[in-house]
Amino acid sequence: MSTEEKSLNFIEQIIEEDLKNGLSSDKLRFRFPPEPNGYLHIGHASSIALNFGLGLDYNAPVNLRFDDTNPAKEEQEFVDAIKRDVQWLGYQWAEERYASDYFQQLYNWTIEFIKKGKAYVDSQSSEEMAAQKGTPSTPGTDSPYRNRSVEENLDLFERMKNGEFEEGTHILRAKIDMKSTNMLMRDPIIYRILKRHHHRTGNDWCIYPMYDWAHGESDYIEQISHSFCTLEFLPHRELYDWFLDQIYDENKVRPKQREFARRNLSHTVVSKRKLAQLVSENHVNGWDDPRMSTISGLRRRGYTAAALRNFANGIGIAKRDNLIDVSLLEFYIREDLNKTAPRVMAVLDPVKLVITNYPQEKEEWLDAENNPEDESAGFRKVPFSREIYIEREDFMEDAPSKFFRLSLGKEVRLKNAYIIKGENVIKDADGNITEIHATYDTQSLSGSGTEASQRKVSGTLHWVSIAHAISAEVRLYDRLFTDEAPDSHKEKDFLEFVNPDSLKVVTGFVEPSLKEAKNEDKFQFQRLGYFTVDKDSTSEKLVFNKTVGLKDDWAEQGNSDKKALEKIEREIGSFFKFDEEKRNVSTANFKTALSGINNYSLLKNEFTKVSKNDKNALLYKNFILSFSKVKASDFDKETLQKLYTMSLKSESPFVRSEAIQNLKSDPENLKEFQTQLSDLKNYEKDEKVLKLLSEL
């Protein structure tokens, strides 16, 4: 590898150090070892890019190995999906391997373990085993079966293999050290009985090796030089090495396990268990739902392999777990599609616009640039006629001065076409606009070179000719979760943060050039975002998925939420000076603002941040508890009791009353404050507070 050492990440530095210390470069071999119990997700994309990227950098083979040791959860469907995803990302493995290829070898080694007194059959229940294993601060105790004879262990293990026992009656454990400070070294399980059909070995086996036993030995069999995994496997490294110690031949390459940090993605989950739950409970429409963090889902949504590779390489490799904002992933897909996606016109919320001075039977086919970022993309023809669709939000009857779209008496340009001027509207019985009437400047055709065509107007609108428009189903996808870290809150089920607006389906109209669009074809709908043809499309019905908008709407919403909280915090001081009428209005405004904030993490951080014990800060926090999406049950008892104690002692009756209202909704803490509330009744002078106290 020619890269200077100072630019290497720590994984590459490990490899370079091993090469300096005598490891031959032709001994380098890597692997990507997924368990086929679900679809790969964005976190796997980083691991794939790491391992296969190392293979490319060092001209070393990379195996795709399926760690298929748990037939209860593994399926051929997942094997096929994983292979498809790896190849789609642009990588090809040297050899396709399976841990199940090595079941007989693992079994043979285990027999040797038993003969050497390094493994035994344990017949305790799982509850008994858990009790005798100890805790991180207290040593475990030996199993009563730990000193079974070699002969008895060999007999029982053979009978386990032959299916003579039911699941859970016996397990095989390594005999290591029940007093080890590493809980994983306290006689870990090597084999358990599982009478399940395996997707490759069928019903040949009634016992299956545990992951920790099979994984390192599979690396050794394949002569993997470096086994890279995520940080949660750091405590497993000692066990990985212990197992290797028992079988290692000095004439062979000894695999080295090293760990890197998992990169979590905001507003999603990357746990296979939780992804499977989303699928099984129908929160999404399958593993490849475009809202999922799976590679298949991202691909279906319209993400490109190049964008995922660039994202993985961009975030790099680290030693500490980190939450990556999904906006960074969106940046990479925008960057890629901006270069490659043809520009087309589509209208998703149409309103009819009639150009009254355009001849009724006339139509023109105008030149439209396919991609200004790619000169070789050329031009296409788009039809123009008297009646067109524009976006409903692009017209306002009585527009403010900074509205840079169409309104009555105002001019805008139609993309690739003419300058038009709003004249009047037609409405239905309910006052809804059904038609907009406009006139056009006949000399203003875009690109014609006339003086009129070069006039500057305040805005440019996209449009579609009604006579030529093609109807299409458009699926508008948004982030699946409203919170940036939905599975990080111990007191909350991650499903509570599922975004109810993560999918909206609309019927839109697209220009006729898209009639022959095929699955996974990608386009920029001008002024709307990037869209991809979905696999549900047919020759009779086009279906598009929104891949990503042209800008980060969530960042704008996040800034808006922060500003809303900052505004409330600033205005709290004035609240105490208002008369009753103004206070009621102010309270209603605070309630509206706080109830409209969906960012749970932001609200929780705002509530728990350190603040002064003054009436402004106390009322602000009580309002958050009263009106926002966070509730008393989301916080620990100490935090709440501190707020209630200070609030009930506050000089302001408004703070006291708000705290009492919150206590009414918090029965658990209400009991704790009965004495303080009773004392408050004796000296409280404010009538409203007294009334609240009497209602408790």
Image (tube, rainbow, N blue to C red):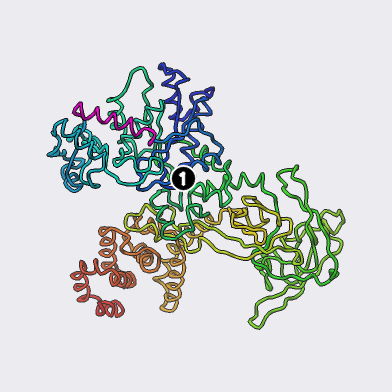
Residue name at image x 62 percent, y 53 percent: 532
Please state the horizontal and vertical placement of residue 438, each as a whole percent of the image. Answer: 78, 71
Residue 217 painted magenta: no
Would you say residue 330 is visible in this rendering?
Answer: yes
Residue 259 location (% of width, % of height) = 38, 34
**Quadrant of res 646:** bottom left
Q: Is residue 595 above or below residue 517?
A: below
Q: Nearer the viewer, residue 211 or 488?
A: 211
Query: With respect to residue 145, does 127 lie above or below?
Result: below
Q: Which residue is mark 1?
A: 40
Between 279 and 185, the residue placed more toward the observer is 279
Is residue 179 visible in the rendered image? The answer is no
Q: Quarter of the image for the C terminus: give it.
A: bottom left
Q: Amino acid at mark 1?
A: Leu
Q: Main secondary structure of the magenta part?
A: helix
Residue range (magenta): 100-117
Q: Residue 460: horizontal and vertical position, in percent?
A: 73, 59
How far across and how far down the image is residue 334, in percent? 60, 48
Identify the residue shown where x is 75% and y is 75%: 424
What secondary structure is marked by label 1? loop
Q: Nearer the viewer, residue 587 or 174?
A: 174
Q: Residues within 10 Å of mark 1 (few under 14, many from 20)?
A: many
Taking 580 as reference, is 470 above or below it? above
Q: Where on the picture, by quarter, is residue 630?
A: bottom left
160 left or right of 216? Answer: left
